[in-house]
Structure formats: C-alpha cells, structure tokens
Amino acid sequence: MSLPKRKPTRLKDYDYSSEGAYFITICTKEKQKMLCDIVGDGAHDVPKINLSPMGEIVEKYILSTNKIPELTVDKYVIMPNHIHLILLLQNQNGTSKAPSPTNNIISRSISTFKRFVNKDIGHNIFQRSFHDHIIRDENDYLKIWNYIDTNPQKWADDCFYTE
C-alpha cells in the first residue's frame, strides 16, 4: 500500500533557524472543541474565553515556552479547537543554522510543547503537523496581532469553527 504524497508545508530555501517572527497555528485532533468555550457575544458583551482543564494545561506550556532562551511567545490565543501563536526567534550562540525544517528551534519547540501537553493530559490531542507563516514585515506582524486579538469575537466566522 502506498501512502499519499504530502505536499511540502515549508517555504523552499528559507532558513527556519534565522531570527524573525513566526505565526503558528496548532489544531486539535479532528478539530475537536476541547480547549475552551467562548461565551458572550452580544453587542455590549465582549466574548470571553473560558479555558477547559485541557486548555489550562495548554496555557501552562505556552507560558513555559518563554523559558527557552532563543524563543519568545509574543502573542497567543487559545480557541476551542486550535491555538494561534506569534513566536519570536532570536539566534544565540550554538543555535543550529541548518535549513532543514525538522532541525530548527521552531519545529523542535512545537514538538516538545505538544509532547508535554499530551503527557499531562494522558493522550494525544493535537493534529500531526502545524501551520506556520513567516512574518515578513511590520504590517504583516500588526495584521496577525490584530487577527489573534479579535479571533474570539469572530469565532463563528472562523475557518476552524464547528458547532
């Protein structure tokens, strides 16, 4: 039996160990709503995120990512079935310069994050891969920051929305 050929998800010839900002999206397995509930959507009621116990574990490990010297979580939001992050990568002495996406701080950090969350929860809650976008300039950064900020208000229109 031959496996389906996966299309590359990384930008060709880009050095994923280079300094910069990255927009990361991690989805739950089968996009199951398990991380939080978004409540309040009236005209005078700003939506609020109520983290589930699994969502609290996810947040704990998002915040602990800032203990990695080369990496900073600059902005994040936990949605019912996915997480958005802006990660800032600053090269330090000893950081790999290998362009391979499987040998860089972003991929290793996401893999480690998922492993710790799954271990705490007791089973795998995430899809296999994650989506990344290299933030190219200040306008791109501000657009993504705003998207993360307003994602809870626009949950019903989100591409990951499920009933």
Image: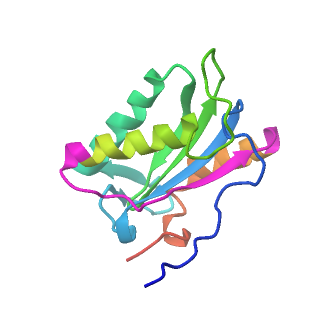
- Furthest-front residue in view? 1
Residue drawn at x 64%, y 60% is 9
Q: Taking 45 as reference, is 124 left or right?
A: left
Residue drawn at x 37%, y 46% is 114
Closer to us: 120 or 16: 16
Is residue 84 placed above or below 34 in the rendered structure? above
Magenta includes 22? no
- Furthest-left residue in view? 122
Magenta includes 132? yes
Q: Taking 114 as reference, is 15 left or right?
A: right
Q: Quadrant of the N terminus?
A: bottom left
Closer to us: 128 or 80: 128
Extent of the magenta region: 119-139
Give the percent coordinates (x, y) of residue 34.
29, 60
Give the percent coordinates (x, y) of residue 110.
46, 43
Q: Quadrant of residue 104?
A: top right
Counting every numbered tag in the picture gives 0
Residue drawn at x 37%, y 77% is 163
